[in-house]
Amino acid sequence: MLEAEQVKIAVVGSLNMDYSVMLEKKPAAGETVLANNMMITPGGKGANQAYAAGRTGGSVQMIGRVGEDVNAKIIKDTLKEQCISIEGIRTDKENPTGMAIITLDDQAQNSIIVCPGANRCVTASETVETLERLPNLKIIMMQLEIPISCVEQTIDYANKHKIITFLDPAPVPREGLSDATYKMLDYISPNAIEAEMLSGIPVSDMDSARKAAGFFLKKGVKNVIIKLGGEGVYATDGLSEIMIPAIEIPVVDTTAAGDTFAGAFCTRLEKGDRFFDAVRYANYASGLSVAGKGAQKSMPSAEEIDQFMQHRAKGKEKA
Ligand code: ATP
Ligand code: RIB
């Protein structure tokens, strides 16, 4: 088990059990269809990102809430397998562990409904209390499946303690994000849809991603990463920019590709990579994750990513 002094990355966020159903075509309103298969696996954007960071070699603590049920045990045991500290996970006596209902069709397109359960009860005070026990923290990762007030106050805490903040703004809250929050963010990583919802600028390619990134930079975010699914990823710090194409790989399930990206990116950043190098690494990690089913189940290890990168480098030398 990781000691508090060893923790470098804290993930403040959701933990869910994912109920994934594989079917040819999603049912229309009033229609009943038979599924081809189903899978029950640990998920939740927070837990996924913690898992991805741990799997790529990060020293991670997960902070959040689960219910007093069997799903909680499975989720925590899975995180422990990656040596992730679960000291920051509280048990909620009144609400069940969060759940997600995921449909995955033949085109590898997924739709997700999240039932927050205990995630809805994560508070800022308990989060800050937990963070205060981590003396060597470098990065706090967040998403938006827990109360926004908790995320805002966590960002404020991080800012006062000079801890790097990384926000994956998913799902986008109806009211958007406050100007004060944007100003305190070191990294934001929306996908194309989230970037459009927050900036009002439709995003589909590098040019439109650059425009949307301009919105976030103007708000005061220091570094912007816009994930473009099968097109790859755009990133900028306002001075320079990079567009990295997605790796070519057979797509099975894109669930948690963005979470894999976030975890791998923060691990590399914490280990000293420069911004664009960490983005490049995360693009490999998330690309590899779409070749397998399930959220955490499909996330590649640091060794698997290294092997893939070496293989590609050799291929390029030959070409
Ligand atoms: P999710 O919500 O499914 O976790 P996301 O919507 O946050 O993901 P995406 O833009 O779908 O994020 O994907 C994140 C990253 O995963 C992309 O930037 C890319 O690096 C990789 N990726 C996604 N889809 C593919 C694909 N079809 N082929 C290769 N890489 C992909
Ligand atoms: O990003 C994928 C995750 O979103 C799933 O694991 C599901 O639990 C939802 O939180």
Image: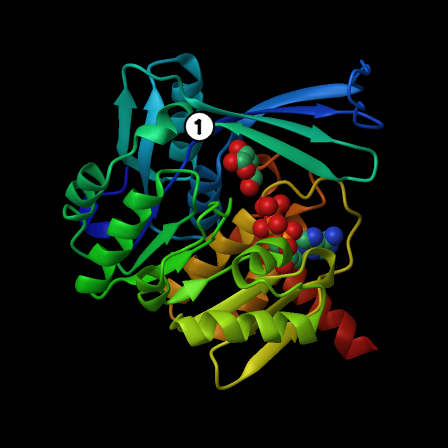
Q: Is residue 58 above or below residue 89?
A: below
Counting from the top left corner in percent of width and height, residue 279 is at 54, 67
Q: Secondary structure at mark 1?
A: loop
Q: Quadrant of residue 110?
A: top right
* Left or right of 127 in this view: 258: right
What residue is rendered at 76% in x and 75% in y?
316
Counting from the top left corner in percent of width and height, residue 92 is at 28, 20
The yes-or-no answer for disc 1 within 8 Å of ligand 2 is: no
- The residue lying toward the viewer, choosing from 68 and 84, is 68
Query: Is residue 296 among the parts visible in the rendering?
Result: no
What residue is rendered at 35% in x and 39% in y?
147
Q: Which residue is mark 1?
A: 116
At label 1, counting other C-alpha atoms closer than 10 Å, the crowd grade (few under 14, some 14-19, many 20 or more) is many
Counting from the top left corner in percent of width and height, residue 126 is at 19, 37
Query: Is residue 37 among the parts visible in the rendering?
Result: yes
Q: How is the image coloured?
A: rainbow
What residue is rendered at 72% in x and 45% in y?
291
Q: Quadrant of ligand 2?
A: top right
Q: Quadrant of residue 23?
A: top right
The N terminus lies in which quarter of the figure? Answer: top left
